[in-house]
Amino acid sequence: MTIADNLRDIRAHIESAKTRRGTNQAVKIIAVTKTHPFSIINACYNNGIRSIGENRVQEAIKKFQKLSGVPMLIKRFIGHLQTNKVNRCLDYFDTVDSVDSVRLAKKISDRAKHLNRTIQILLEVNTTNEEQKNGFLPEQIGEMLYCSTLSGINIEGLMTVGPLTKNEKDIRRSFGLLRKTKEDLNSKLNKKKINELSMGMSNDFQIAVEEGSTMIRIGTALFGKRR
């Protein structure tokens, strides 16, 4: 199966999921190109994908330095970002989709002001309450609202990583909680409301779309398992 074949199947599954749930939201496919060679980014672009996700700053920089003649490709940082790597990250990435603390949001805000830029971000929410995961807890609405007051950043939406399980009820609960958190935040935001929900990966994106996802992060389903 080629990337084109896999992409066709993914898009068909997205449409089927929306039909089952009776929704019609636009769903962006973020190709997770981490650990894959630079050639994969070109292949994604040639197949119409305009957003890629990387989770290691240094690895991504080596690939991005080869990019030329690839307009309108959005480079999204999707991994855990250490505060001491914020400056380098913002030099190469267009968005940070995994802002998991007020401290990190402040650091990005400070750097964005220095660069005279507005950085698009997603706030990461730990909807499974697993200690090994990063992110705001759903009840930390006050902290998330505070991030919305920082200059130099624009919160597009929320992101979560579903539980590592095949239990559909647990997966659906996690994604439903992110949707509810977005609704809670929007009810308290006086300024621009947030719209994006980044949830769902290769193994659970259909459930995520049913629960309202507007961004899915796809690696294995698009490229196959690494050998």
Image (spheres, helix red, strand yellow):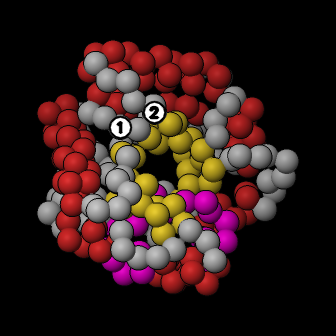
**Mark 2 in CB contact with mark 1 (< 8 angstroms):** yes
User: Quadrant of the rendered structure where residue 76 is?
Assistant: bottom right
User: Quadrant of the rendered structure where residue 169 is?
Assistant: top left
Residue at x 39%, y 30% (from the top left corner): 25
* Residue 100 on the magenta segment: yes
Give the total number of marks visible in the rendering: 2
Q: Position of residue 74 (x, y in %)?
A: 63, 50
Locate the N terminus by quadrant. Answer: top right
Q: Is residue 64 left or right of residue 16?
A: right
Q: Nearer the viewer, residue 152 or 92?
A: 152
Q: Start and end of the magenta stretch?
A: 87-106
Secondary structure of the residue carrying numbered label 2: loop
Q: Position of residue 161 (x, y in %)?
A: 32, 50
Query: What residue is pinned by disc 2?
Result: 27
The image shows residue 212, relative to residue 128, as above or below, that is above
Q: Amino acid at mark 2?
A: Val
Q: CA distance from mark 2 to mark 1?
A: 7 Å
Answer yes or no: is residue 91 visible: yes
Locate the C terminus by quadrant. Answer: top right
The image shows residue 135, relative to residue 212, as above or below, that is below
Pick whichever of labels 2 and 1 is earlier in the sequence.
2
Q: Position of residue 221 (x, y in %)?
A: 49, 30
Secondary structure of the residue carrying numbered label 1: loop
Instruction: Kindly identify which numbered label has been placed on residue 213.
Output: 1
Q: Judge the density around disc 1: few (<14), some (14-19), many (≥20) Cα neighbours within 10 Å.
A: many
